[in-house]
């Protein structure tokens, strides 16, 4: 494979390009400058919950067209307290409690976006977005194309996505692959507080409908943030992944909570001499193909990690991209780690088995690097 001889050929990693995706708001800082700046000077810790809350607060303060709607977002301050303090600050006209009718308030949100407002629609869990999927797909995602660009739908659908803990199959579904398969939508999934702030601001400012997939178990997690991230003008580019950890032996792609698992696995692998590169996708659609393929051209191995079902998943799409664009660089078969192909069990022991774990990533990396011990040899 070319990975074995790439050094003698002088093949370098492809420079990733950042595409500016129609930002019609003057207060957005240029994407190029946002991507090129260094956000490494740590000043404080911030939870993902506070990052989302502050992003909503700042965008509502900067643009009177932005408003929040959903079940319990006002008086109760959000099921997960993401909208804490916003009702007192902006009033019931801009922080609107709704009845328990996802189809109803999602349709109202899409209609408001047609008329130039910028709604942020909160689902208590993305499992309930199925009640409103007609409005998300047929009304929001397709309108710009079907109107020849005459209708923009600047709306954000946000809420917790995927598994939490002991909430059963009807509250544990990961919808990243579902929504990422639909043209007209942008799909974002943050991991850290920096991701949450920067991506939610980008989603609210974007002229197109954005599905913003959060993770319930990450809301209370704290991450270091820099002064740049805390700046009210901070914004991350949609469609650009982040290399969380550089490496040379194997590429691990992941998003949301699984990024933390990938980083833990990379730390364990380093003790065995395997230097893993961890990519935080951030954006599921558009997918940062350039960063992924450039990494695989360097490491010559790939593992994809996600909580969703294995069939037709995000990892499947990444595997297809790598096979199409840099198959000759692979020195080992691609490893795909995903949730079990069953509805999420309720029992705690079965739930753990149904979800990817750190040890699954470690075993897959060792297989790809030909470091695993065959069962016959260990007997």
Image (cartoon, rainbow, N blue to C red):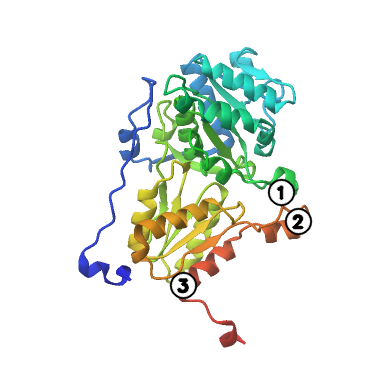
102 or 45: which is nearer to us? 102
Q: Residues within 10 Å of mark 3 (few under 14, many from 20)?
A: few
Q: Residue at x 78, y 55 (%)?
A: 347
Res 81 seen here = yes
Mark 2 residue element: helix
Provide the residue designation for mark 1.
165
Q: Position of residue 379 (x, y in %)?
A: 62, 87
Disc nearer the start of the sequence (1/2): 1
Q: Could you tell me how far apart the alpha carbons at marks 1 and 2 are, in whole angstroms?
A: 8 Å
Q: Residue at x 31, y 35 (%)?
A: 32
Q: Position of residue 117 (x, y in %)?
A: 52, 16
Q: Is mark 3 in CB contact (under 8 Å) with mark 1?
A: no
Q: Residue at x 58, y 61 (%)?
A: 358
Q: Position of residue 73 (x, y in %)?
A: 67, 24
Q: Nearer the viewer, mark 2 or mark 3?
A: 2
1 or 370: which is nearer to us? 1
347 or 9: which is nearer to us? 9
Identify the mark at residue 272; answer none if there is no mark.
3
**Where on the picture, by quarter, is residue 234?**
top left
Q: Name above or below for residue 148 compared with residue 247.
A: above
Provide the residue designation for mark 2.
348
Res 54 seen here = no
Q: Residues within 10 Å of mark 1 (few under 14, many from 20)?
A: some
Mark 1 residue element: loop
Identify the mark at residue 366; answer none if there is no mark.
none
Of the 4 image quadrants, the one containing the N terminus is bottom left
Disc nearer the start of the sequence (3/1): 1
Q: Is mark 1 in CB contact (under 8 Å) with mark 2?
A: yes
């Amino acid at each position: 494979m070319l990975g074995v001889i790439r050094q003698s050929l002088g093949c370098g990693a492809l420079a990733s390009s950042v595409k500016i995706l129609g930002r019609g708001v003057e207060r957005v800082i240029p994407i190029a400058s946002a991507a090129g700046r260094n956000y490494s000077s740590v000043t404080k810790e911030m939870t993902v919950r506070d990052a989302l809350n502050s992003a909503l607060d700042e965008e509502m303060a900067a643009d009177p067209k932005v408003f929040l709607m959903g079940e319990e977002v006002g008086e109760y301050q959000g099921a997960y307290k993401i909208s804490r303090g916003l009702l007192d600050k902006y009033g019931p006209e801009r922080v609107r409690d709704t009845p328990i009718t996802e189809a109803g308030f999602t349709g109202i949100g899409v209609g408001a976006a047609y008329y130039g407002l910028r709604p942020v629609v909160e689902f208590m869990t993305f499992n309930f977005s199925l009640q409103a999927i007609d409005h998300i797909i047929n009304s929001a995602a397709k309108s710009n194309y079907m109107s020849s660009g005459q209708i923009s739908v600047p709306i954000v659908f946000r809420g917790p996505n995927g598994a939490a803990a002991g909430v059963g199959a009807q509250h544990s579904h990961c919808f990243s692959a579902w929504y990422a398969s639909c043209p007209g939508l942008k799909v974002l999934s943050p991991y850290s507080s920096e991701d949450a702030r920067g991506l939610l601001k980008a989603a609210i400012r974007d002229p197109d409908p954005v599905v913003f997939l959060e993770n319930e178990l990450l809301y209370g997690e704290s991450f270091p943030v820099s002064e740049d991230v805390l700046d009210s003008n901070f914004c991350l580019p949609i469609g650009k992944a982040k290399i969380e950890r550089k490496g040379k032996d194997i590429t691990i792609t992941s998003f949301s909570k699984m990024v933390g698992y990938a980083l833990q696995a990379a730390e364990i692998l380093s003790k065995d001499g395997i230097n893993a590169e961890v990519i935080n996708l951030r954006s599921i659609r558009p997918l940062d193909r350039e960063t992924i393929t450039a990494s695989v051209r360097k490491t010559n191995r790939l593992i994809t990690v996600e909580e969703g079902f294995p069939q037709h998943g995000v990892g499947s799409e990444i595997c297809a991209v790598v096979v199409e664009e840099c198959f000759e660089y692979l020195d080992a078969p691609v490893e795909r780690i995903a949730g079990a192909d069953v509805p999420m069990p309720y029992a705690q022991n079965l739930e753990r088995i149904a979800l990817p774990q750190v040890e699954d990533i470690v075993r897959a990396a060792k297989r790809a690097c030909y470091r695993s011990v065959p069962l016959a040899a260990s007997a």
